[in-house]
Image (cartoon, rainbow, N blue to C red):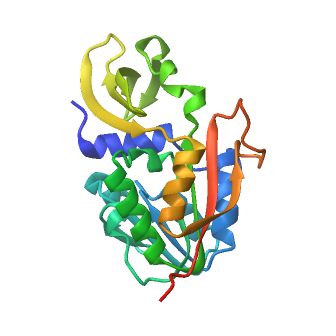
């Protein structure tokens, strides 16, 4: 079987953080470089903040995630603050210059309550004018249609050969429920994880952000700063926290 610790290690293999090689990583790295304090919400194994510190970021870096196994890997670096918790647990009054949610982590906020509580907490953790940067898959691209066993990938990781695939269980009211499977090359199942992701369009997303006190600073449809179009697969957002009226 594959343990939680193994799954966290496998995540790093499947999702290496490399701003030199990946446009999405470079997009966030550019923002981090210019921010003196950063809260990475859903930091996972901490690869983005590890990179930032290794490449000279001297300010406050904090990673927040509910996954204990992922945080155990993140804590290999002791010069970054690591906090166990969900987005709604972001520290109020911390005055961060930048908050991020990478790797489509925003889509794990499934219910309206989760979204509103999380956005309110992130807003409260930022200083007035602080930025919140994140991306979510554009529902028009219907990315989940590619999540099926016919697109299984064979990889070498954890010292063994593995096969990885996804299978959609349901698509309902903008929420996609699916299973991720890790198996031996012959198909012998080692681990199955069930996930739910929320797909929001631009209008619904912007309404939630406005209700939480954010103003849209920039909006892109790809990692090269192109506009959102009818063909965009991503909705990439940089929002600013507006001051709360007394």
Image location (x, y in percent) of residue 105: 45, 49
Q: Is residue 126 above or below residue 139?
A: below
**Residue 192 in the figure: left or right of residue 148:** left
Viewer-proximal residue, 70 or 134? 134
What residue lies at 26% left-to-right and 28% top-to-bottom? 192
Viewer-proximal residue, 105 or 164? 105
Image location (x, y in percent) of residue 213: 52, 70
Q: Is residue 104 above or below residue 170?
A: below
Q: In which quadrant of the rendered view does residue 149 lie?
A: top left
The N terminus sits in image quarter:
top left
Do we see residue 165 in this rendering? yes
Image location (x, y in percent) of residue 147: 46, 22
Viewer-proximal residue, 73 or 66? 66
What residue lies at 39% left-to-right and 55% top-to-bottom? 115
Do we see residue 76 in this rendering? no
Image location (x, y in percent) of residue 65: 35, 59
Q: Is residue 22 above or below residue 161?
A: below
**Residue 215 in the figure: left or right of residue 110:** right
What residue lies at 46% left-to-right and 20% top-to-bottom? 154
Q: Is residue 138 above or below residue 94?
A: above
Viewer-proximal residue, 38 or 130? 130
What residue lies at 32% left-to-right and 25% top-to-bottom? 181
């Amino acid at each position: 079987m594959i343990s939680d610790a193994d799954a966290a290690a496998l995540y790093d293999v499947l999702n290496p953080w490399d701003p030199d090689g990946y446009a999405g990583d470079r997009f966030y790295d550019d923002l981090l470089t210019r921010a003196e304090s950063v809260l990475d919400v859903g930091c996972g194994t901490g690869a983005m903040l590890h990179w930032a510190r290794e490449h000279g970021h001297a300010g406050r870096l904090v990673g927040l995630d509910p996954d204990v196994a992922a945080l155990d890997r993140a804590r290999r670096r002791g010069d970054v603050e690591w906090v166990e918790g969900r987005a709604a647990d972001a520290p109020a009054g911390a005055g961060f210059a930048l908050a991020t949610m990478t790797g489509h982590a925003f889509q794990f906020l499934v219910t309206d309550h989760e979204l509103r509580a999380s956005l309110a907490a992130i807003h409260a953790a930022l200083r007035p004018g602080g930025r919140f940067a994140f991306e979510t898959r554009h529902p028009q691209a219907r990315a989940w249609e590619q999540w099926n066993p016919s697109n299984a990938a064979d990889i070498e990781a954890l010292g063994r050969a593995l096969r990885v695939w996804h299978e959609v269980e349901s698509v309902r009211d903008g929420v996609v429920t699916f299973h991720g499977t890790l198996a031996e090359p012959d198909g012998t199942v080692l681990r199955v994880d069930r996930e739910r992701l929320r797909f929001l369009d631009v209008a619904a997303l912007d309404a939630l952000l406005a209700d939480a006190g954010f103003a849209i600073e920039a909006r892109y449809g790809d990692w090269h700063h192109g506009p959102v179009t009818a063909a965009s697969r991503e909705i990439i957002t940089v929002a600013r926290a507006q001051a709360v009226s007394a």
